[in-house]
């Protein structure tokens, strides 16, 4: 059972099959706040956070008929990233689609990255084959090099069912633009077209295919590919809305989508004179209580006020009193839990004010008076030390504040202290705000340079440059069209890059080897990566750069003072090619700059913000207070890079990156204990 093309509609354009080698790249939303999270919050489903997807397409085959569907996965990728607000979409097409690569993406990349409050979508475009068994049939997905009747060379439905178990998302949806029998899961137990809004938010795992056994789906050139994907995209863009008793509510549930697909696919096959039936199928993978859904950004906000009250959804005003807003942010920074700041002096804010006033010995009014405002400022900004400096002390009496021994880089001593880590009014992964104590530690003044890392590569005989280890590119880099593509050779830059540039394209395995080499001579204390708490502590100490006082900790970096901060770090300036470019200034560095090209922060550290994201030692946790996973596959990076918007410069911004991932905008610096 294969997908058939209506030959009378196929042009030579499809036969050319441009780009048959395929794509293997990720699109990551540049905004630090989830795009779909904003849509879900408007729709009243604020508990759901990130949305991830893998889009797979095979149209060029060795032994199966080629399909005119090469644009289908690209159109699906573009819809998810540009319209549906998905945060992370990986596209894999043509010859790049192998069982080993799919296994790597599902188990090593998505499994540790997708959390229990996230959503995950799997889309496949290609042929479908069926193996007749004594007890029924089993479905398979042929790859580019799959051989007919060689089912071991294909992806089995059992592979999809197994991968589904590894994804811990709240909602999962598999969309297979192919026809199958022997589907995973069972028939849904309820009418998903009439599911209530409250039920909709529950956990859900479903699978939809384009057809069933003995049916042949079709692709038509003037539709741009498959009729199933054409109908799918039309449906999630709004045509499938109002297919239930609720009417047009701005949400496309999986039940509404399946009902619409049945109607639209039937209409299209008749319009193109395809007489055989095509019946999209839906399966429930886990006895689901809820169902995957697509919010409509263009329609839903206008209806929000009408439907939110009856569902008990809290409506947060877009703006409030700016003075109250600043006080709320300050109280959150001081560790008081009062919810998202809204500029309204409500119950939670008054409760936090009374708690602060009690602690500060003030009248417990719950109001924002002058005495309370002054006390908040004093709590945020410690009084200066007026103790006169010692005069004519001997060098041996001075505490050591710098260190440079062995092959390692110069380092400065960071005095330990207590600070508030995280924030409650940012993205979910930035919270919660909590008190953390950091012990004194040493940290390198710059990111690790090409010179030092090149010395390690040379002494260890790591022949990356001649590509004996790297048969193909292993490092991702951002392209001008905002795609993260694996196009760079990790260490080829060692041949041409100046010694004082920071090393990038290094994953955690590379860094572990480097640290082992660096500590081999018995460095004591040994070199290591900074912890996540240490790195945020460094960023928080940089908020008062140049002695400026800030009520809100990161307002200095992210409140549109673009022309001011771009002189102090390598961020996305006017010369950068990205759509979040800062047009208000130019730092002269469209890419990575040499270390120490900009002035240091008050700790004497260069590029602690910008230039390169930097690895820290911690495994990724959805919230920084969560325990580390037993099986660590995803690490954490901090500090933003040369190709990031200003909003990513905040002290609490953190990003997950697979430990095996190499990127041109990720590097690292070193740290050591004090004893």
Image (cartoon, rainbow, N blue to C red):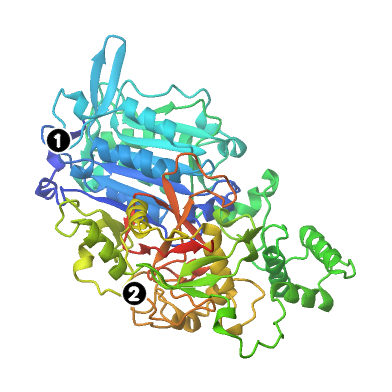
Secondary structure beneath label 2? loop
The x, y position of residue 116, in whole percent, is 53, 40
Residue 519 location, x and y as percent? 38, 58
In the image: residue 140, left or right of residue 207: left
Q: Nearer the viewer, residue 473 or 83?
A: 473
Residue at left offset 35%, top offset 69%: 578
Toward which corner of the image does residue 378 lie, by quadrant?
bottom right
Q: Indicate left or right for 278 with 68 as reference.
A: right
Q: Residues within 10 Å of mark 2 (few under 14, many from 20)?
A: many
Given residues 58 and 450, the one toward you in this image is: 450
Q: Quadrant of the C terminus?
A: bottom right
Seen from this angle, which residue lies furthest bottom?
Answer: 392
Residue 407 x, y percent position in the rendering: 34, 67
Residue 69 visible in the shown view: no
Tell me which corner region of the image, top left, top right, bottom left or bottom right, holds residue 574: bottom left
Farthest residue, direction top: 134
Of residues 53 and 230, the one nearer the viewer is 53
Q: Is residue 586 above or below residue 99?
A: below
What is the C-alpha distance between the residues marked 2 and 1? 40 Å
Q: Residues within 10 Å of mark 1 (few under 14, many from 20)?
A: some
Q: Residue at the spot x=55%, y=83% of the render?
A: 395
Describe the element under mark 1 as helix, strand or loop: loop
Vertical side of 140 occupied by 144: above or below:
below
Circle 2 is placed at which residue position? 576
Marking on residue 145: 1
**Image x and y of residue 652, in percent:** 55, 62
């Amino acid at each position: 059972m294969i997908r058939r093309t209506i030959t009378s509609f196929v042009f030579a354009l499809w036969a050319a099959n441009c780009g048959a080698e395929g794509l293997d790249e990720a699109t990551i939303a540049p905004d630090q706040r989830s795009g779909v999270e904003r849509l879900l919050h408007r729709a009243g489903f604020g508990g759901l956070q990130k949305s991830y997807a893998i889009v797979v397409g095979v149209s060029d085959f060795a032994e199966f008929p080629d399909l005119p569907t090469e644009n289908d996965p690209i159109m699906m990728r573009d819809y998810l990233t540009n319209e549906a607000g998905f945060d992370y979409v990986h596209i894999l097409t043509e010859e790049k689609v192998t069982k080993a690569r799919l296994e790597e993406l599902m188990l090593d990349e998505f499994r540790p990255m997708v959390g229990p409050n996230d959503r995950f979508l799997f889309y496949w475009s290609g042929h479908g084959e069926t193996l007749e068994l004594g007890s029924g049939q089993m479905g398979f997905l042929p790859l580019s090099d799959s051989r007919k009747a060689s089912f071991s060379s294909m992806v089995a439905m059992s592979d999809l069912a197994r991968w589904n178990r590894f994804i811990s998302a709240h909602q999962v949806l598999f969309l297979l633009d192919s026809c199958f029998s022997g589907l995973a899961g069972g028939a849904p137990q309820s009418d998903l077209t009439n599911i209530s809004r409250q039920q909709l938010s529950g956990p859900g795992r479903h699978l939809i295919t384009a057809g069933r056994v003995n049916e042949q789906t079709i692709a038509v050139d003037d539709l741009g590919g498959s009729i199933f994907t054409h109908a799918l995209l039309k449906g999630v863009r709004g045509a499938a809305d109002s297919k239930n008793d609720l009417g047009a509510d701005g949400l496309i549930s999986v039940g509404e989508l399946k009902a619409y697909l049945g109607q639209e696919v039937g209409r299209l096959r008749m319009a193109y004179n395809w007489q055989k039936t095509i019946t999209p199928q839906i399966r429930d993978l886990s006895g689901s209580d809820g169902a995957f859904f697509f919010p409509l950004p263009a329609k839903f906000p206008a209806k929000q006020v009408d439907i939110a009250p009856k569902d008990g959804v809290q409506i947060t005003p877009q703006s409030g009193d700016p003075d109250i807003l600043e006080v709320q942010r300050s109280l959150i920074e001081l560790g008081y839990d009062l919810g998202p700041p809204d500029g309204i002096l409500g119950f939670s804010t008054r409760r936090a004010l009374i708690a602060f006033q009690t602690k500060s010995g003030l009248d417990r009014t719950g109001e924002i008076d002058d005495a309370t405002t002054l006390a908040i400022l004093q709590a945020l900004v410690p009084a200066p030390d007026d103790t006169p400096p010692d005069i004519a002390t001997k060098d041996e009496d001075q505490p050591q504040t710098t260190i440079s021994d062995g092959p390692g880089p110069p380092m400065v001593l960071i005095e330990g202290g207590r600070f508030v880590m995280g924030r409650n009014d940012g993205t979910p992964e930035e919270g919660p705000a909590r008190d953390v104590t950091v012990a004194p530690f040493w940290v390198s003044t710059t990111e690790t340079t090409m010179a030092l890392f090149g010395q390690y590569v040379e002494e260890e005989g790591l022949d990356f440059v001649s590509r004996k280890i790297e048969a193909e590119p292993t490092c991702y880099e951002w392209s001008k069209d905002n795609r993260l593509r694996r196009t760079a050779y990790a260490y080829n830059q060692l041949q041409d890059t100046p010694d004082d540039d920071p090393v990038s394209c290094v994953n955690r395995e590379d860094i572990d080897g480097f640290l082992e080499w660096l500590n081999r001579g018995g460095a004591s204390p040994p070199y290591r990566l900074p912890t996540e708490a240490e790195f945020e502590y460094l960023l928080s100490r940089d908020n008062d750069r140049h002695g400026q006082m800030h009520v809100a900790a990161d307002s200095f970096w992210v409140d549109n003072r673009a022309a001011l901060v771009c002189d102090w770090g390598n961020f996305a300036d006017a010369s950068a090619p990205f759509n979040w470019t800062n047009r208000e200034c130019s730092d002269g560095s469209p890419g990575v700059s040499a270390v120490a090209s900009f002035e240091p922060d008050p700790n004497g550290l260069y590029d602690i913000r910008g230039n390169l994201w930097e690895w820290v030692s911690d495994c990724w946790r959805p919230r920084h207070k969560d325990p580390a996973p037993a099986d660590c596959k995803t690490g954490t990076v901090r500090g933003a890079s040369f190709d990031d918007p200003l909003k990513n410069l905040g002290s609490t911004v953190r990003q997950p990156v697979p430990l095996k991932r190499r990127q041109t905008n990720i590097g690292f610096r070193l740290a050591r204990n004090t004893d």
